[in-house]
Image: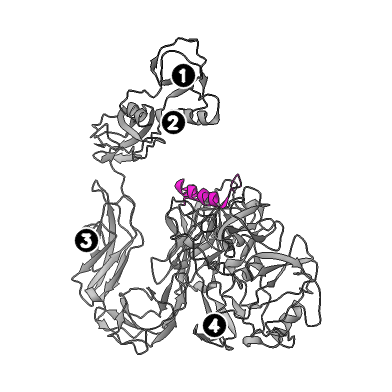
Amino acid sequence: QNGIERLRNENILAGNATILLFSCNVAGDSAGEAFVQALADWSGATVYASSNNTGPYVSNDGLVTQDWDLDVVRQPANVSPLPAPLAVAQVEPTVVSGTLTTLDGSKSTDADDGIASFSWAQLAGPNVSLSAASAASPTFVAPVVSSSETATFRLTVTDYSGQQSSADCGVKITATATLPAIPTDVAAYYQTSMNRNYINWNPVPGATGYKIYWDTSSGVTKTSEVLPETSTPGFGHTGVVSGSCYYYRVAAVNSAGDESALSAEASVCLADNIPAIPTGIAAIFQTSSERNYISWSPVADATGYKVYWGTSPGVTKTSEELPETPTFDFGHTGVVSGYSYYYRVASVNAAGESELSAEVLVKVTFTPYSSAGQLPDTGQTQCYDAEGNVLDSCPAPGEPFYGQDAQFQGPRSYTKLDTASNDLPDTATEWTMVRDNVTGLIWEVKSARNGTKDYNNPNDADNTYTWYNSDPEINGGDPGTPGDGTDTEDYINALNAANYGGHNDWRLPTPGELASLVNSGRYGPAIDADFFSGIAHHYYWSSTTYARDTLGACLVDFNYGGVNRLLKSYSLYACAVRSGASESLAPLVINDQGTAREDDDTVTDTNTSLMWKRTTSTDSMTWEAALAYCQQLNVENFGGCNNWRLPNVNELLSLVDFGRTPTVDNSFFLGSMWANFWSSTSYIFNTSNAWDVHLGFGVSYPYSKSYSFYVLAVCYEPSGYADALAISFPNGGETLTAGQDCTVTWKTDILSPINLQLYKGDTNILSIAENVDPSDLSYTFTIPANLEDGDDYRIRISSTADGTIFDFSDAVFAIASGSAAQNILVSCGYGHTVVL
C-alpha cells in the first residue's frame, strides 16, 4: 500500500491508470476479490486480474521466463474508481464598487485524499485582479462601474489522484450603495449611576455606523446637534442637566458614508425632584427562564429603577444591587434552587434616588436544564452502548452513540405540599400532595402501605380498582366494570367527597400525565420514591379508554416504566391528579389550525416547542444506527436546524393521542405511524434494550438495541421571542377579511401590560390596543373596512415596560376585502383549535 501511495502522490501512477495482475490466484475467491478491491482503492486505478500465467515472473529460484498463452483473459474485478472531488464556489451576491471581496472555495471537499490544488479563473464581467488565483479563498477589490455589472468566476479543484471538479459563482457589482434602512424602536432613558442619557435602537442590517442627532426641544433634524458616530446600536450622552428635556433621532450609515433618513423621535426629561417610592412590588420565579421576575408600578418623573436584594429579610441600600433598569420590571438570573430571595426597589432620576419600597419574597424551586420544551425529563443520567455497557463518558458529536437520552437533561422537579397546599422542604417527613414544578400538576400522595386494603379510605395505598366511568361522553363507548366502592369512579368520588388536601376537583390522570411521573433512571419502582413513597411497583389506571379496543383502558407500569393497556375488568392501582390538564402533556398540536402544509419539511408541536422531521426514516434500523441517522441531519442542517436528535421516550409519547386510533394523526407526517419507533432512552432494567413507542397503538416497550425500528427525529426550535411572549394567531398563512372581527392570541409569562400593532410590510399602520393585560392571552378587534388588500400583513405584540420583549407573526398573512369566508376558531380542549 505504501509503495502505491508513493507512486500516486508523485504523479507516477495516473488517476486513470490500469493495473494488470497475472499468475495470481486472485480472481476466483472472496479473499482475492477483497484484495483487488483494496488495490483499486489505494491506487485509484482500474484493476484487472487473471489466474493465467504469462511472461516473466519471480519464483523462489529467481526470475523465470516462460511464454504461455499471451491472450490473457482479463477478468475485471467489481471495483469502482475513486470519486472525483466536489468544487464549491461562493461569493457575496452583491457588493459595492471599492469593496474588498472574497471568493470562497474552502467548502470544496474530496471524499478520499483531500484537495491538492485550487485554481480560480474569471469568466465574465469587469476585470478584477485576484490576490492569489491558486488559493482556496482569494480576494479582489470590486472595480468602479458606471452601472451594475456581474463578474463571474470558475473554481477548479484537483485531488491527489488527478481528478478534477469545477463550480461557478457570480457577484453583482453596484455603482453606488443603497441607503441603509431607518433605525427603529429608538428609546432614551436617564442612567442615574452614570449621570447620562442612554439612547438605544434596533440594529440595521448593512449599517457600519450610526449618527445620533439631538436637541432640547422637539423637532430634531440633521441640522441639530450630533453626537459622535458609533458602530453599535447604543450610546451614552453625558453632560446632561437636570430639569431639561432631551430629544433624539438616529440615522444609520453605510460603508460609503451614506445616511438613512432619521428615525422617529425619542425623548427623556430630567426631573428636579426626587421621584416617589415605587409601589405594587411583585416577584415570582419563572421556571421557563430560570429567573426571579420582579415588577412594580411605574413612578412619575422616574427615569430608572434600582433593585436591591438579599437571601434574608431586611434588604437595605447596602445589600446586593441589580443593574439599573429604565423599565418597570427586571429578571434576576443566576438564582439558586432552594433559596429565598428578598427584593426592594427604589426609583431614580437626575435629582436623586427615592427611599426603598416594601419588601417582597420569592422562593426558588427548580431543576436547571438545557433540553427542550416543558416535558419532564426521563430521569436517565448515564450513557450506554449497544450491549448495555455503561460508557465512562457520554460520546461527543460525531462519535458512535452520541445523542442518547442522558446527553439532553431536561427539567424534573417536585415540591411537597401540606394539607393547605403550602410548600414544604424536600426534607419534610409528612406531606399530603406533590406538585410537579414542570407540568404544574398536583398529585395525591398515598398513605403508607401496610398490605391491607381499606376502601373506607380512598387514599389508602393498598386499594385496587376496576376501571369504570358511567359518562358515555368520555368512557369510549364502554363504561367498564362497576364495583361497590371498588371501581375508579367510586374512588374519585370518595376522594372529592373527603375534600382531600382541601380540594374536590381530583380526577384520574391521562396516560401522558401518568407516564410523566416515570423515572427511566430506576426501576422497582420506576418513580421518584422520595416524593411518591406510597406508589406500588405495579400497574396504575389512566382515565382513557383504549381506542383500538374499548373493552380496555390505558395504564402505566411503575415497576419498570412503560405505557400499555388491559381489560377494564382487571383490578389495578390508581393515583389521582388535579390542577387541570398540562398543556405540554396534551396530544400533539402542530399549529393553531391543527394542520401541516404538504411542502413542509418539519412540523412543530406548539405545546412543547419540539420540531419534528415530518418524514420518517425510509428504512428501519438498529438503535445505534438511529442515533447516527439523527446526527447526519445535523450535518445537513436539515430544515434549518442543527439540534436534531433521537427523541427520548417522553418526547415520543407527547405525540400520542391515546383517545384515537392510530394514536398519531398520519396527516401530520409523511410515512406510516403504524410502526415501532426508537427512543433515545435505554431500558434501565436491561440496558442492552431501549424503549420504543408504537405510534399506531400508543404503547411503549423495551426491545433489544439490535432490533430494527423506524426513526422520527426531533429538534428543539425556540420561538426566538424574549421572556415567552409569542403570538399564536394570526401567525402566518391565514386570510382575514377587512371589516370583520379578528381575535389575536398569544402565550406569555410576563406581567407588564402589552401593546398590539398591525404592520403592512415593515410599516406600522394601526395601533390595535395598548396596555392590555397579558394574562388575558387574547384580544379581539375589528379589522378596518378600508384596509387595502394585501398578503404582507403581520401582528406585532410588545411589552410596554421593556422594548426588547416583543414578537411578530412568524410569517405574513393576508387581508382581503369583501365577504370572504371567515375563520371560525373552535376550542376543543388540550390546546387544540380547529378552523371551520
For mark 4, give the secondary structure: strand
| Residue 638 on the magenta segment | yes
Query: What residue type is disc 1 on?
Result: Phe
* Nearer mark to the viewer, of 4 and 2: 2
Residue assigned mark 1: 22
Mark 1 nearby-residue class (10 Å; few <14, some 14–19, many ≥20): many
CA separation in Å, label 4 and label 3: 63 Å
For mark 1, give the secondary structure: loop
| Res. 819 in view | no
* Nearer mark to the viewer, of 3 and 2: 2
Residue assigned mark 4: 416
For mark 3, give the secondary structure: loop
CA separation in Å, label 1 and label 2: 19 Å
- Is mark 3 in CB contact (under 8 Å) with mark 2? no
Magenta stretch: give its range. Answer: 615-641
CA separation in Å, label 1 and label 4: 82 Å
Report the front residue among 183 and 605.
605
- Tell which circle, 4 or 3, labels the residue nearer the N-terminal end: 3
- Tell which circle, 3 or 2, labels the residue nearer the N-terminal end: 2
| Residue 685 on the magenta segment | no
Report the front residue among 59 and 648.
59
CA separation in Å, label 4 and label 2: 65 Å
54 above or below 312?
Answer: above
| Res. 53 in view | yes
Residue 283 spot, x, y in % from top left:
43, 80
How many marks can you see?
4
Which residue is situated farthest in the left direction here?
239
- Tell which circle, 3 or 1, labels the residue nearer the N-terminal end: 1
Query: What residue type is disc 3 on?
Result: Ser
231 left or right, relative to 741: left
